[in-house]
Amino acid sequence: MAIIITLSAVSVPAFQSIRGGSTVNKAVADLSSTLEMARAYAMANRTYVRILLGDAPAANGQVLPVLVAQPIFSANGSAAGDMTDASVWPALSRPLVLQNLRIFDSLQGSLPVDTRNDVTPLGANVQGAVMSPLKRATAGLGLMDFTGVIQFSPTGEARVSFEEPARYIKIAIDQPASGSATSAMGKNPFILRLSGINGSIRILRAGEVAL
């Protein structure tokens, strides 16, 4: 008999506003817990869970830029199916929304952790086709463009590629420089380094991250 994890027991915050260094700690905790919840659900329910990552446009009083992490799961336990179809890949929880943060793959872990060979979720192809981007209706945000995905299998393996497993997956995040959507500010950078094999997460913070 499958073990069912209720979302009330592993609830993910629906919306989180991130402003300044003192609240980046909360962003780290919320994103880490979202990844851990996704892996636990996949293993307990023998299904596939994916975290879709993207930037949301200004809406509903939100301040740009906004990083969105939307967990979804396979309704039939298969890795196949159209991720834009909510009946095939329903939302596992409401999206985690982090204001004033974006993914910057250019950020790297410095000594003692070198992340240059880590894979990243942007442009992932877990279904054999590169996302370009994936458009999906998202609670509270309307139609969203998602450009990255991390998949957790029923065995707890994490990957971003259809072709091969990942040793480490890097999610590098920072506040953007003023007026730029492509440059990191370097004020509050952090990297979540996810093990593809066992899902463990290592957090690298300012001083361990090279801009």
Image: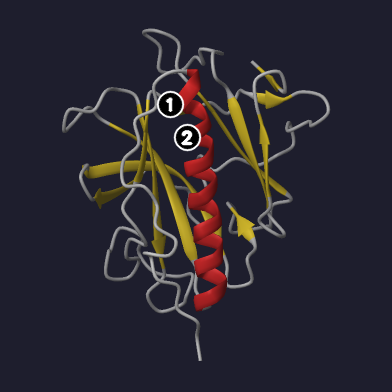
- Where residue 186 sits: x, y (%)? 56, 13
Q: Is residue 125 visible?
A: no
Q: Are marks 2 and 1 in contact (CB under 8 Å)?
A: yes
- Where residue 126 sits: x, y (%)? 53, 57
Q: Which mark is residue 101?
A: 1
Q: Secondary structure at mark 1?
A: loop
Q: Residue at x 27, y 42 (%)?
A: 144
Q: Is residue 10 left or right of residue 199?
A: left
Q: Nearer the viewer, residue 124 or 185?
A: 185
Q: Residue at x 69, y 57 (%)?
A: 165
* N-term mark: 2 or 1: 2
The amino acid on which the numbered mark 2 sits, given as a three-letter code, is Ala
Q: Residue at x 39, y 38 (%)?
A: 54
Place residue 188 in its image quadrant: top right
Q: Which residue is mark 2?
A: 27
Instruction: Report the coloring of the rendering.
Output: secondary structure
Q: Residue at x 45, y 10 (%)?
A: 177
| Location of the C terminus (image quadrant) | top right
